[in-house]
Amino acid sequence: MKFDNIIIGGGLSGLTCGIKLAEQGKKCAIVSSGQSAIHFFSGSFDLLGKANGEEVTNPLESMKSLPENHPYKRVGLDKIERLTNDALHLLVRSGLNLNGQADRNHYTLTPMGVMKPTWLTLSDFTSFDQKDSFPWKKAVILNFSGFLDFHTLFIKDGLKKLDVQAQIKTVSMKQFEAIRKNPSEMRSTNIAKEFDKENAIEEFAQKANVLSDGFDVVILPAVFGLFNKTIADKLKEKIEKPVLLLPAIPPSVPGIRTQITLRERFQELGGTYLLGDNVEEGVFENGRLLEIRTNNHGDIKFEADQFILASGSFYSKGIVATHDKLYEPIFGLDIDGDSNREKWFDEKIFNDQAFMHYGVKTDQKFRALMNGEPVENLYVAGSVLGGANPLKEGSGAGISLLTSLHAAEQILK
Ligand SMILES: Cc1cc2nc3c(=O)[nH]c(=O)nc-3n(C[C@H](O)[C@H](O)[C@H](O)COP(=O)(O)OP(=O)(O)OC[C@H]3O[C@@H](n4cnc5c(N)ncnc54)[C@H](O)[C@@H]3O)c2cc1C
């Protein structure tokens, strides 16, 4: 099979790159072994939440203080602002409704009841301008009977620090009787499937209106709108008080919907999306990647002019660490990381962990290095790149979106 571009990995990076290339008329395929980090998505795309240990107000300004090997610095700060606009427009064109801007972080309330700075937030969730001012004084936190993935006590404690008086209440729904019989079935996605049917929303809203009498705001787990993209808005219309949705324990309902929305956009543009297929090896000649082989397709080779590696970090096995080595498992690309295992981690778990900065080594054009030499037509994007600790910095989605667009631009030049 021959394509213009083949992307390895169908997470946020692979899909962004694929959409950008397909929008420009490229015949693209994405091969993805499994689900991605978007299934754990909080609902917010982070750009830069912390730099040098300090909370960031203006991510574009604070990027100047990042180390030279940080992906943002390597993309080039002169390009970043334009790429943040391009990323936002690409997501909106794909069908996502988002709030936020790159030169001013806003805040969202986390499931731990803490305000966190971020860049773009899905419109399901509430964005706050200020970190320490919560607009409501009395909150009711509603959970579903038997749903263990929404930690209401953490939220209540967090709200107390914001001077908010909160009360926890439980709602029973007859629609959930079947899934409640087995606690492992009482998960956010199964609840969301019930709510995708609009009559369940009607019944729930009536109960929520009774239970929220005397409160200023209703706090709920974000289990609305798995396939039905309008259901969260309908819920908000039917509940008489303001509704604040908070992420529950994954799988994330808004995350899965985001993944589906981006995948649909890619496919509508003519892209081929192969899910559940693992890229196992590649054939190289004269510093170029000629073809890749996948688990499901055996001897059928996938050829392309350019390839993009967007296989994620440790979590997605884009890079792998065993007790004695760190490696990139498909092609054996060079790794930007320490060969001495003792330097990989700090025993103090909350410190900046060195291994979080490891990734595939690239040249200035984000082409992968193999034995010290760039592979002419193999670009690298997203969290498989090293040079940042997205968890500490709050930069995960930003790095994925911007490096993917940058890689696509190198290809389109
Ligand atoms: C659990 C978790 C939650 C996160 N939540 C947020 C958040 O809420 N907000 C935020 O800003 N950032 C978040 N991040 C940061 C996250 O890294 C980025 O936001 C981004 O989603 C990463 O996208 P990616 O495409 O680079 O990698 P991934 O999402 O990891 O996707 C990589 C894909 O490559 C595939 N793959 C790997 N190897 C192969 C192979 N050999 N063949 C074929 N396919 C392969 C995997 O199956 C996977 O689908 C989170 C990260 C994690 C790990």
Image (cartoon, rainbow, N blue to C red):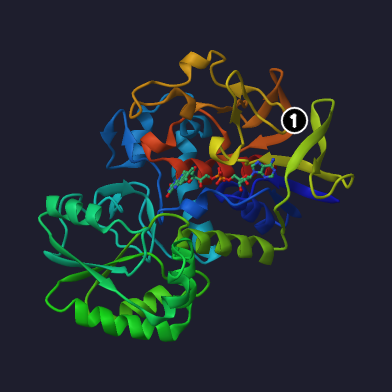
Residue 23 in the image: x percent, y percent? 65, 58
Quarter of the figure with residue 411: top right
Residue bearing mark 1: 376
Q: Position of residue 264 (x, y in %)?
A: 62, 65
Question: Taking the image as drawn, is residue 244 in sight?
Answer: yes
* 285 with respect to 212 (left or right): right
Location of residue 107 with respect to 399 vertically, above or below: below
Q: Name the foreground residue: 230 vs 58.
A: 230
- Where does residue 173 sit, x and y in percent of width and height? 36, 79
Categorize mark 1 by other alpha carbons within 10 Å: few (<14), some (14-19), many (20+): some
Q: Name the residue type under label 1.
A: Glu
Q: Decide which of 8, 33 is in the foreground and name it.
A: 33
Q: How many marks?
A: 1
x 43%, y 32%: residue: 389
Q: Quadrant of residue 327?
A: top right
In the rendered view, does 15 fall on the left or right side of 75? Answer: right
Q: Residue at x 42, y 40 (%)?
A: 395
Q: Is residue 86 visible?
A: no
The residue at 67%/29% (across/down) is 368
**Residue, x 32% and y 36% (percent of image)?**
50
From the viewer's perspective, is 98 left or right of 279?
A: left
| Ligand 1 occupies quarter | top right
* Image position of 282 with respect to 412: above or below: above
* Quadrant of res 298: top right
| In the image, the residue with mark 1 has its CB under 8 Å from the nearest atom of ligand 1 | no
Quadrant (top left, top right, bottom left, bottom right) of the C terminus = top right
